[in-house]
Amino acid sequence: MATRNLDIIPLYDWGMFTEPRPSVIAGPCSAETEEQVMETAKGLREMGINVYRAGIWKPRTHPGSFEGVGSEGLRWMQRAKREYGLKIATEVASEKHVFECLKFGVDLVWLGARTTANPFLVQEIADALKDTDIPVLVKNPVNPDLDLWIGALERLNRAGIKKLGIIHRGFSTFDKINYRNDPQWQVAIELRNRYPELPFFVDPSHMAGCKDYIREISQRSLDLGFEGLMIESHCNPSVALSDARQQLTPDELSDLLYKQIKVKDKDSDSPEWKENIDQLRAKIDIIDENILYALGSRMKISRQIGEIKRNSNIAILQTNRWDKVLAKVMAKGEEYGLPEDFIKTVFNAIHEVSVEVQNEIISGK
């Protein structure tokens, strides 16, 4: 799809985040009691957190699960804002949620993955936020649909929301992986490439599903150059009413941010760095050109094969042949130290285009 420009106000002009990175939003998965909200807020403020999050309305898969305390929780967060000087943030999934947040002085809202996947809800929220100055972050949709993610951003931006950013929390998967959600970093990187000006947060809590993996996900996101982290923190995670396994205490969060992870610079004025990186990038440019030449040559041969199949009345798909080709290139890729999934993805994409080319020839297009 064609990339449309977004009219964005830079993150550090929002009045709630300051450099150096990472910008952090932290707080419990859910506001549960006034005591819990205030105790967690106090611990986070003491360690330097400025933006405090808590879920007020919880979209649960099954009825009967804890679905949040509702607007009463906003009153508790309002108190935390007043007493500790925090900016407060929560998730919205409807027009009603937006109006309640505006009434209680919420400083930032975000759209959850299920909401992002529903253009009707996104438009409803965009209309409710029109003519406000409140920042909005958009989580990725449940499935890796980049157009759906971008569409949500466009709807909000067209409603006049200029303090706009995204949260990458990974994608639902049936595969057995260590994390709760599949990061699929390539999707996030593609969005970053299309909209480099867009503030980019990562939610390692929801991506991990348990606190054992929060450090490595946080570091990976910083290594990629993303600006911020949204991390769940609870004064006593063992008694949390939702997502207890993935929440850190304020002390654990402090240890993570100040001792365990390291922010990488985006650039350097060092002459040695610039000389080395320029030389290596020049080599990559040459290799990329050779790859394109090789792909073009391969497609020419695919066209010739298509002509032979047409003249011999042979079907396009030769499954046994392709299985042998794929097995061969995957074995060769292993010799070069290339990941199996990468090889499979690349060559299946090449094969798909080759089939399309042959189909055009056989059908006479």
Image (cartoon, helix red, strand yellow):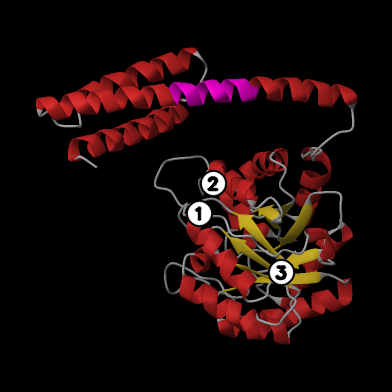
* Residue of label 3: 162
Question: Could you say where residue 18 lies in the image, as x and y percent from the top left?
Answer: 86, 57
Front tag of 3 and 2? 3
Within 10 Å of the Cα at label 2, are there few (<14), some (14-19), or many (20+) other Cα atoms? Answer: some
Within 10 Å of the Cα at label 1, are there few (<14), some (14-19), or many (20+) other Cα atoms? Answer: some
Badge 3 or badge 1: first in the primary sequence: 1
* Residue of label 1: 146
Disc 1 is placed on an element classified as helix
Badge 3 or badge 2: first in the primary sequence: 3
Question: On the rendered structure, is 298 left or right of 79?
Answer: left
Question: Could you say where residue 16 lies in the image, as x and y percent from the top left?
Answer: 83, 65
Magenta-highlighted residues: 284-295
Tag 2: residue type?
Val
Q: Is-magenta flag for residue 126?
A: no
Classified by dominant secondary structure, the portion drawn in magenta counts as: helix
* Residue of label 2: 187
Identify the residue shown where x is 65% and y is 73%.
Answer: 32
Tag 1: residue type?
Leu
Disc 3 is placed on an element classified as loop
Disc 2 is placed on an element classified as helix
